[in-house]
Image: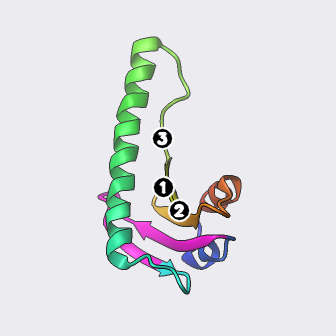
């Protein structure tokens, strides 16, 4: 399981956060100078859980309808915005500045 302390140290991370299965923000760390707030991270947590739920429904439906396997379970979600990207895996996430986002490093750190 990753720690918020290790996630916030990744290059380009503006915030690291943990959330419940219902999408409620349970803990977070924000980098100095970031404009992200607890309220924004709480909304983002809900958005990530909702999108993983929808993607899970779609993956299960695809596997059922086509007989193809390997799409389910969905563990993570990435949201690319204009200035930053949110990357989650299970119940942890990071928000990274788009000018320095490293998807591989983020998913590796979240998978620990």
Left or right, residue 46 beside residue 29: left
Question: Furthest residue to the top?
Answer: 66
Q: Nearer the viewer, mark 1 or mark 3?
A: 1
Confirm or deny contact between disc 3 and disc 2 (CB under 8 A).
Answer: no
Magenta segment range?
Answer: 12-28
x 57%, y 65%: residue = 96
Local secondary structure at mark 2: strand
Q: Residue 27 magenta-drawn?
A: yes
Task: State the image coordinates of residue 19 (x, y, percent, origin top left).
Answer: 39, 66
Colour mode? rainbow
x 68%, y 58%: residue = 102
Q: Nearer the viewer, mark 3 or mark 2?
A: 2
Neighbor class of circle 3 (other Cα within 10 Å; few <14, some 14-19, many 20+) is some
- Sooner in the amino-acid sequence: mark 3 or mark 2: 3
Against 18, residue 81 (above or below) is above
Task: Name which quarter of the figure residue 107 lies in.
Answer: bottom right
Where does label 2 land, which residue?
84
The residue lying toward the viewer, choosing from 42 and 40, is 40
Where does label 3 land, which residue?
74
Task: State the image coordinates of residue 31 (x, y, percent, origin top left).
Answer: 55, 82
The residue lying toward the viewer, choosing from 71 and 14, is 14
Against 77, residue 15 (above or below) is below
Neighbor class of circle 2 (other Cα within 10 Å; few <14, some 14-19, many 20+) is some
Question: Furthest residue to the bottom?
Answer: 32
> Dividing the image into 4 quarters, which one contains the N terminus?
bottom right
Q: Main secondary structure of the magenta part?
A: strand
Confirm or deny contact between disc 1 and disc 3 (CB under 8 A).
Answer: no
Indicate which disc residue 23 carries: none
Task: State the image coordinates of residue 10 (x, y, percent, origin top left).
Answer: 67, 71
The residue lying toward the viewer, choosing from 59 and 15, is 15
Confirm or deny contact between disc 2 and disc 1 (CB under 8 A).
Answer: yes
């Amino acid at each position: 399981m990753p720690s918020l302390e290790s996630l916030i140290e990744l290059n380009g991370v503006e915030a690291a956060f943990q959330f419940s299965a219902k999408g409620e923000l349970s803990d977070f760390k924000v980098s100095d100078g970031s404009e992200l707030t607890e309220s924004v991270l709480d909304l983002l947590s809900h958005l990530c859980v909702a999108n993983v739920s929808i993607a899970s429904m779609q993956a299960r439906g695809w596997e059922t309808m086509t007989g193809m396997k390997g799409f389910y379970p969905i563990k993570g979600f990435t949201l690319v915005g204009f200035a930053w990207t949110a990357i989650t895996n299970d119940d942890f996430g990071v928000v990274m500045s788009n000018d320095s986002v490293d998807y591989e490093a983020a998913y590796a750190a979240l998978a620990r």
